[in-house]
Image (spheres, rainbow, N blue to C red):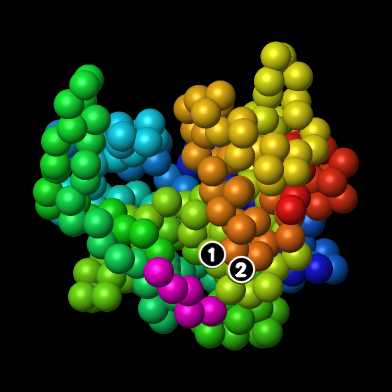
Amino acid sequence: MKIVVKIGGSLADEGLEKVVANVSAATIGNQMVIVHGGGPQINVLSERLGKKPVYVTAPSGFRSRYTDEETRNIAVMAMVGNVNKKIVSLLNQFGISAVGISGADGSTLIARRKDKLIVQEGDKKRVLRGDYSGKIDEVNDKLISLLISLGYVPVVAPIAMSNDGELVNVDGDRAAAYIAKSIDADMLVSVTDVPGLILNGEVVRRLMMSEAEKLVPMVEGGMKKKIFAAIEALKIGVPAVIICSGLMENAVISAIKMESGTVITR
């Protein structure tokens, strides 16, 4: 099978070795692409450099990072220079030939720079300019497909190239969704630090896309974005999305078999 695995930034420090061990075990007999996040690592590096992270809320209710040019540069350092290479190093230690790239390499991810954000502040809206985040318009899968054909596992950091040749920060979950579509993946496995979507204290095991859409307003925090990204992945043609914990034994293999986590299908 062809599988895209998204490793959440919450797992990119403590627990990363166990997560990568789980992912490595799941590569046997499968073609795999790994996409990772790095939000917490961007925050840590920002604080060390004296740059306070700024978050804003869109009128839709989604919370996101305000990425000015300096924050964009920090994001590149944290994700491409740190998280990406840590994952590659661990994969190689587990005997997996991995190659780390960003979405800008080979123009793999082409995104439309947002430039300005409309943010909700109480009952009022205002415009923030100078943003360097982006919305993915296109995936050029040539480099990823070449690496897969040569037996490598590509590890992709969610930094994209804008149509004007600027580096932009893009959402890792949505990057994984579009990459999964571009390579005709059989599934997208979103690996996080919780066992799936939890409602009323229980893990929701299976959802149809229509059911997931109804649940989006009820879900909060990072899981809200993951459910939204899962719906987007299904709408563009990815057959199934599984949200699971990367800290459980045989987590990714179990998720691929749809025996754990929250399975969302069309």
- Seen from the viewer's position, the closer of residues 144 and 222 is 222
The residue under the point 75% across, 50% down is 265
Q: Are marks 2 and 1 in contact (CB under 8 Å)?
A: yes
In the image, is 106 to the left or to the right of 128?
right
Other residues around mark 2 within 10 Å, as few (<14) / some (14–19) / many (≥20): many
Q: Which residues fall within the magenta stretch?
A: 137-141
Relative depth, front residue between 169 and 44: 169
Quarter of the rendering occupied by the N terminus: bottom right
* Amino acid type, callout 1: Tyr
Q: Position of residue 123 (x, y in %)?
A: 21, 21
Tag 1 residue:
178
Q: Residue at x 17, y 26 (%)?
A: 124
Q: Secondary structure at mark 1?
A: helix
Amino acid marked by disc 2: Lys
Asked if residue 130 can be seen in this view, the reply is yes
Residue picked out by circle 2: 181
Characterize the magenta stretch by its predominant secondary structure. strand
